[in-house]
Image: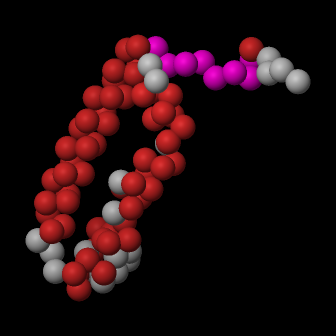
């Protein structure tokens, strides 16, 4: 069985890819700042879900994977496609 043209995703344009790459660079820079900041926080606070009101009752330590390696894993197929261009 072959896929119809209607079901095939349209690849992003070069301008869209460049915009995404710039967004990723900015996100990466923010992550580096976060890492520098987190290094100065005592481990007890990092693991305490009530240490920071803005985390909504989630330990800061638990939020980090979703903002870094878990996030990248969720987009791995797209990242590989971009790497091949």
Residue 44 vs 82, above or below: the answer is below
Most extreme residue toward the front is 84
Main SS, magenta region, reads: loop
Most extreme residue toward the right is 1
Q: Which residues are magenta?
A: 6-13
The mark total stands at 0
Residue 33 vs 16, above or below: the answer is below
State which quadrant residue 85 falls in: top left
State which quadrant residue 2 falls in: top right
Q: In this image, 69 relative to 52: left or right? A: right
Quadrant containing the N terminus is top right
Res. 59 visible in picture: yes
Instruction: Estimate the x, y position of residue 13 in percent, counting from the top left.
Output: 46, 14
Res. 56 visible in picture: no
Residue 34 vs 38, above or below: the answer is above
Instruction: Estimate the x, y position of residue 72 in percent, counting from the top left.
Output: 43, 47
Q: In this image, 29 relative to 14: left or right? A: left
Q: In this image, 31 relative to 82: left or right? A: left
Front one among 50 and 84: 84
Q: Residue at x 43, y 51 (%)?
A: 71
């Amino acid at each position: 069985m072959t896929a119809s043209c209607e079901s095939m995703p349209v690849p992003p344009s070069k301008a869209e890819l460049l915009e995404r790459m710039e967004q990723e660079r900015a996100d990466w820079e923010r992550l580096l700042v976060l890492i520098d900041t987190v290094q100065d926080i005592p481990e007890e606070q990092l693991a305490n879900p009530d240490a920071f009101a803005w985390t909504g009752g989630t330990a800061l330590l638990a939020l980090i994977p979703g903002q870094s390696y878990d996030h990248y894993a969720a987009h791995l197929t797209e990242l590989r496609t971009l790497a091949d261009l």
